[in-house]
Image: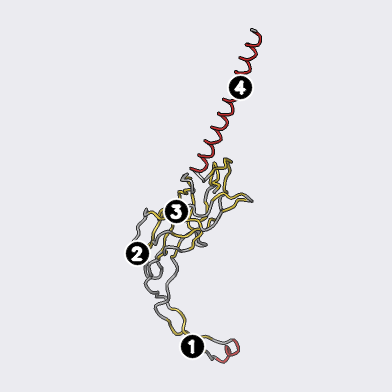
Amino acid sequence: MRSENLRLDVCQNIVIILSMRILITLFLFLFMNIFCFADPSLRDYDEFDIPEGYFIPVISLQEFSTAYCEEGDKVKFKTTNDIFLYNKKVIPEGTTLEGYIDKKNEPIIGTHGAMKVFVNKMYLPDGYEVPIKSYIYTANNNILGGGLTEPAEYIKKPHYARRFMFRAMSVNQYVPGAKRKMGEHLTVSAGANLMIILVAPIHLTHTVIE
């Protein structure tokens, strides 16, 4: 009789233990589902570097100009498409980047206004902030604007054709003189398509899976 009671107690304990394990498994499953629905932007934790010299296409989220902006004024940009490193999406479309006007030159006689924009922050869609070092890219050492103005005058200059050189015959031509017009301010409009170039690698600890 005692052995039967003992067996019954053992069976009941086993049933209780199995029931508790099933309840714990269900709880964990429900918790993970709730967490996933509450935060649809999942993370893939895999550290990697985006190399120096990498280009990131962006659009400007605001207008900025040498006419009314000063050095240190903040500017914001947003990526226009997904950025891939090999076959891995590392920067999603819509990632926000922030920087400031690093240097500004007012327009002068002979030269248009110019700016150099440094971009130092990147915000992934999950809100994670990544420090970066980059500039708005141009072929002129990343300087926006700064080109020569149009000539303010043209002077008449004789031009000798090769077949007439020994006969002292020439044709008068107008060529740009030494004087140039006053430069104009540089304005980058909101929505302008720009390119950012990294001057140091970006170290990322994860990517965002939407």
The amino acid type of the residue labelled 4 equals Val
Question: Which comes sooner in the sequence, label 4 or label 2?
Answer: 4
Q: Residue at x 40, y 74 (%)?
A: 180
Quote the CA–CA distance across marks 4 and 2: 79 Å
The reply to whether callout 4 and callout 2 are in contact (CB within 8 Å) is no
Residue beneath disc 2? 67
The residue identified by callout 1 is 172
Type of amino acid under label 2 = Ala
Q: Is residue 10 above or below residue 121?
A: above
Residue name at image x 51 percent, y 45 percent? 40
Q: Position of residue 71 (x, y in %)?
A: 37, 55
Residue found at the far left of this picture: 68
For marks 1 and 4, give the one nearer the viewer.
4
Q: Give the secondary structure at mark 3.
A: strand
**Residue placed farthest to the front in the image?**
1
Looking at the picture, how far across and down is residue 24, in whole percent?
55, 28
Which image quarter holds the N terminus?
Answer: top right
- Residue at left offset 53%, top offset 48%: 200
